[in-house]
Image (cartoon, helix red, strand yellow):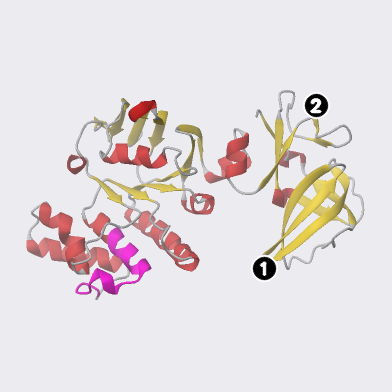
Amino acid sequence: MSYLEIHHLTKIFQKGVKAVDDASIQIEKGMFFTFLGPSGCGKTTTLRMIAGFETPTQGTIIMDGKDITDLPPEKKQIGMMFQNYALFPHMSVEENVSYGLKIKRMKKPDITKNVQRYLAMVGLSGYEKRKITELSGGEQQRVALARSLANEPKILLLDEPLSNLDAKMRDDMRFELKKLQHELNITMIYVTHDQNEALMMSDQIAVFKKGKIQQIGTPLEIYNHPVNAFVADFIGQTNLVDVYKTEDNKVYLNQDCSLFSEGNVEDAKKVSIRNECILFSKDPTSQPNCLKAKVVNKQFNGLVSYYVIDVQGITLHVTRMNGSYEYEPDINESIYINIDPRSVVKLGG
């Protein structure tokens, strides 16, 4: 039995709007699990049902073998960190972190000990007396995290907690949050629409679309083996191309352009080819998917360069690492491309 089990969870709002549609998930203890998807896909509603802030229309939520579906938030031993942090601006850092502990009627020495411990964990020792209005966005985010952890929940839910930070602060906090989760061995469920966050931080990811879970798996599984075109397109950069026809282990992208793929491709409707899996060469090679192409456009972007190429009437996008000392073609140059058959991933639609 998994630590948290969600069975056939459904939420229907007024006018029959189905925000979450028959979601079933199993999450192990100590796992960093991410709900990923575009705005309005049901990921936050699912999080709020787990927390007890929304009542499921149907379905059950089991934590550590106990049915907690209908328990109020204060009885669930689940913490939640909101997108806007929900800090009290008129209180000090210490007062914010200790707020939940006082409601629990914890003894004052224990409150002080807990506050100091978790402020130290998030790198805010010595900030106890500061007002929230005196802190930067990153520091406020750390206070909110310390407050959530100080209550020592069995599961911590985080609803897009890094969305209000600048790019560098987000990168720093991703590392700190994952490090903290590992050190405490706490189960975290993280909501985001940022695919990079999901790929970098998660042990497992559930990809949502219009209230339905499309795929659950490790970042590597979802990136390399998407179950459908939505997942392939939403996670990372890829070339989604309609299949013109199939023949044994070969897919035709049009009448002239064909590629070998690994395994049976008879029922393929589309193929996904990751941008970084297309390699350039100046001369033809003996590889199974070596095709002549022409560079249509090129854009330098620091770490990488983006190419648009034409392959026998098919437009493909290529991402290449700069500074790799490999062949770097120019616009309008005729080249050859090589694609490993394992990188030609068949999709049903």
Quarter of the image holding residue 257? top right
The residue identified by callout 1 is 302
Q: Is residue 135 magenta?
A: yes
Whether residue 340 sits left or right of residue 285 in the image: it is: left
Among the two numbered marks 1 and 2 on one chain, the one whose residue lies closer to the N terminus: 2
Residue located at (36% from left, 59% from top): 180
Quarter of the image holding residue 311? top right
Amino acid type assigned to the residue bearing label 2 in the image: Lys
Q: Give the percent coordinates (x, y) of residue 225.
A: 62, 38
Q: Is residue 37 magenta?
A: no
Give the dominant element type of the magenta stretch: helix, strand or loop: helix
Q: Give the percent coordinates (x, y) of residue 79.
A: 26, 48
Residue located at (8% from left, 54% from top): 105
Q: Give the percent coordinates (x, y) of residue 331.
A: 85, 60
Asked whether the residues under the numbered discs 1 and 2 touch, taking CB atoms below 8 Å apart as contact, a structural biologist would say no
Count of labels in the image: 2
Amino acid type assigned to the residue bearing label 1 in the image: Gly
Q: Which residues are magenta?
A: 127-145
Q: Is residue 122 above or below residue 12?
A: below
Whether residue 289 sits left or right of residue 224 in the image: it is: right
